[in-house]
Image (cartoon, rainbow, N blue to C red):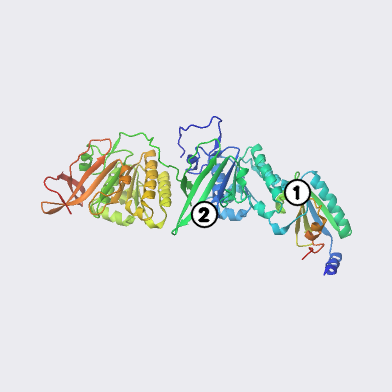
Amino acid sequence: MARARRLKSSSVALIKTPTGISGLDNITDGGLPKGRTTLIAGGAGSGKTLFGMEFLIRGIEIYGEPGVAMTFEETAEEISSNLASLGHDVNKLVREKKLFVDYVHVERRQIEETGEYDLEGLFIRLDHAIKSIGAKRVLLDTIEVLFSGLRNESIVRSELRRLFRWLKDHDVTAVITAEAGDNTFLTRHGLEEYVADCVIILDHRVTEQISTRRIRVVKYRGSSHGTNEYPFLLNEGGMSVVPITALGLSHKASTERVSSGIPGLDKMLGAKGFFRASSVLVTGTAGTGKSSVAASFVNSACGRGERAMYFAFEESESQILRNMLSLGMPLERWIQKGLLQIRAARPTSMGLENHLAIMCKTIEDYRPSIVVVDPITNLISVGTAISVKAMLTRLIDLLKTHKITAMFTNLSLSGEEITSTEISSLMDAWLSLKEIEVDGARQRVMYVLKARGMAHSNRVHRFTISDQGIQIEDEVRGQERKI
Amino acid sequence: MGSAIESMRRASKKWRLRLYVAGNTPNSIAAFANLKEICENHLGGRYQIEVVDLLENPTLAKGDQIVAIPTLVRKLPFPVKKIIGDLSNRERVLVGLDLKAASGI
C-alpha cells in the first residue's frame, strides 16, 4: 500500500500514474510519469513483458483504465498463457473490452524493401486500438524487434522518435520494453536516448544456483526515487517489489505494550511487556528454549485475538505444533481460527532477497500484528553477514511501518553473546537464555540484556519449561557458572 | 529455369495484388504508379490490384500484419509475398514478386 511520503519534489509538478504493482509505487514515489513513456530494460527472462502486462492489468483492475498491449515478440495466446501463471485472465479482459492485445509480426526474411516507406501502419493500428477501448495505458513489447525486422535503421529510428511524440500527444502513459545492452548503451539499440523521462532496469541473476530478481530505477526526470536495487517477486500473486530500504528512522514510537505471553517475563520488562511495534531478539544456545519463548508470545497474542505470523526456518509446522502442544500450548486452534499462520521454509531453498520478498508479501497480504522469525541464524548460510543485516533492516522497517511487534530467535554458540553487534543494534529488546550450573544443578535462566525505552530488570531469573509452558521463578543468587 | 517460371506465369490464373496505403501520401501515390507499370510490363492483363486505405479501414491492417506504408501484398498466386516501400526499386520488386530471380546468386 502506498504511504504518503513527505519528500521534496521538484518545482514543476510531475503528475504520476500509480502502477498498482505492490511496492513499485513506493520506490517511484507515486508511480510512472503520466502521459509520458517509461523504458523498461532487461535481459532475456528478466520479466519485462510481465512487468508491462501487470502495469496494464492493474491499471484496469484497480484504476479502471483500459490498456493496449502491442506485442512484437509473443503472440496474444502466448501472453495469455504466461499471464495465467501469474493469476490473470487476459482473455476475459479482452472480451470485456478493457484490454486490447495486438500482435505485430515483423519478419525480415518475409519482406522485401523497395524504396521509401514509413511505419504509419503501426501508428494506425495503435490509434485504432486505443480508440476502440478508450485506453489510457499502452505497452509496446519489445519495440526493438523493429530493428531486426526492417533493414532501414534510419527509418526505424526516425519513426520511433515520431512514435514517442505521438504517444505524448495522445495522452497515454506508455511502457516500452527493450533488451539490455552491453556496456556502452543501456539498451541494445540505444532507445534510452529517445525516452528521456523514466528508465527502469530489471535484472535476473543466478548466483550459486539461487536466482534473484532485482529492479532499479535508473532515471526518473523530475522526480525523487529510490536509487537502490530492490528485490521483486514474480509468482502466482503477480509482481511485487520489496520497497523499503529502511535507512529512514522516521517511525513514530508507540507507548502501547504487548505481553510476552510469559507473566514473569513481563514483570522483568518494566512490568508490562514489550513495546508495540518493537523488535525483540531472543538468543541462546541449542535447547535453551528460544522457540518456546516465541511460541508463548504468539500463543498469548492469538488468545487476545491478534493475528500472528510465524516464519520457521528450522522446524516444520507439524514439529512446532507438536512440540508446543506438549508444553501446554495448543497452537492448532489459532490456525483453525485464522489467527495464526506458520510458514516453514529451508533457508537454502532460495536467495536471501527472495526470502525477504516472500516474507514481505506474506505480511502485506495477511496483515498480522505479531511476527516471529525462528531462527534467523540459518539465513546467514544463504548470504553473507552483511546481506543478512541488510535484509533484516528492510524487514524490520516494514514491520515497524505496519506497527508489527516482531520476535527473532538466534542461536548463539557456547553461551557467549557473540551475536553480531550489527544485528543486535537493529533490535529494541534482547533477551538471553542460558543454561547454567547453580549449586551443582543445571538450571535454565534468562535475563534481559537490553530493552530500549523502559526500566527493565537486570537480574538473572530462573525459569522452567514444562507442560505448563514457561514459568519464571526467582532470581539467581550466588555463583554462576556457565555450562 | 527462367523460361519455366515464365511459362508457369502464362499458364497460371490472375494475379491478385493488394496495396496498403494511408491516405494520398507521396509514397503511396508513387507506389501505385510504379505498381501499375510493373504489372502492365510483366503480367500482361492478368492482374487485379486492390488498394486498401488504412485510414479508412484500420482494422484491415492486422490481417496481413501491416506495419510499413506502403506495403504491397501478393495474395495470388501462392505463396503470399510482402513488399514494402514505394516500389521505386524495380529490381527488388521483381525479385520480391518472384518475377525475376535475384541477381548474383
Q: Residue furthest front?
A: A184
Estimate the x, y position of residue A180 in percent, counting from the top left: 57, 51
Mark 1 residue element: loop
Left or right of A326: which side holds B14?
right
Q: Residue furthest top?
A: A11
- Of residue A184 and residue A398, the one placed in the foreground of this image is A184
Disc 2: which residue? A85
Chain identity of mark 1? A
Left or right of A458: which side holds B36?
right
Marking on residue A117: 1
Left or right of A314: which side holds A441?
left
- Crowdedness of circle 1 by 10 Å Cα count: few (<14), some, many (20+)? many
Tell me which numbered mark, 1 or 2, is placed earlier along the sequence. 2
State the CA–CA distance, disc 1 to disc 2.
40 Å
Estimate the x, y position of residue B84 in percent, counting from the top left: 76, 53
Mark 1 vs mark 2: in front = 1
- Of residue A301 and residue B35, the one placed in the foreground of this image is B35
